[in-house]
Image (tube, rainbow, N blue to C red):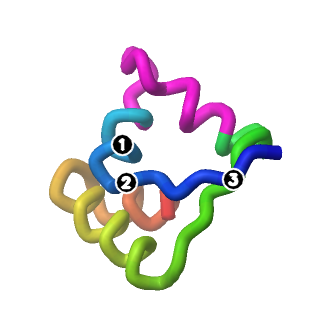
Amino acid sequence: MRYIVLDTNCLLQSLPSKSPYHKIWTDVMAGEISLCVNTDILEEYEEKLCEYSAPEVAHNVV
């Protein structure tokens, strides 16, 4: 298991399936990588994701 802190911009880059960084997200979802976050980071993730997608999508990602 690997543990990482993922910058918000890196998170945004890892979500699209055609992104060269998508493996980061798939590894998180598969449980191979564990994100180290706190409430502030999660709130920032959700805030920025809402700028680019529907609030429901942002909530599901967070």
Question: Farthest left residue?
Answer: 51
Query: Which residue in the protein does label 3 denote?
Result: 3
Residue marked by disc 2: 7
**Crowd class of label 2 (few under 14; some 14 to 19; many from 20; radius 10 Å):** few
Image spot of residue 60 (x, y percent):
51, 60
> Contact (CB < 8 A) between labels 1 and 2?
yes
Q: Which residue is mark 1?
A: 10
Q: What residue sits 49% from the left and 26% below the top? A: 22
Image quarter for residue 49? bottom left
Amino acid at the residue labelled 1: Cys
Label 1 – label 3 distance at C-alpha: 15 Å
The amino acid marked with disc number 2 is Asp
Left or right, 25 with respect to 16, comes to right
Across and down, in percent, residue 45 comes to 36, 64
Kind of residue sitting beneath label 3: Tyr
Indicate left or right for 1 with 43 as reference: right
Q: Residue at x 42, y 34 (%)?
A: 14
Find numbered disc 2 in the image and state the secondary structure of the residue it sits on: loop
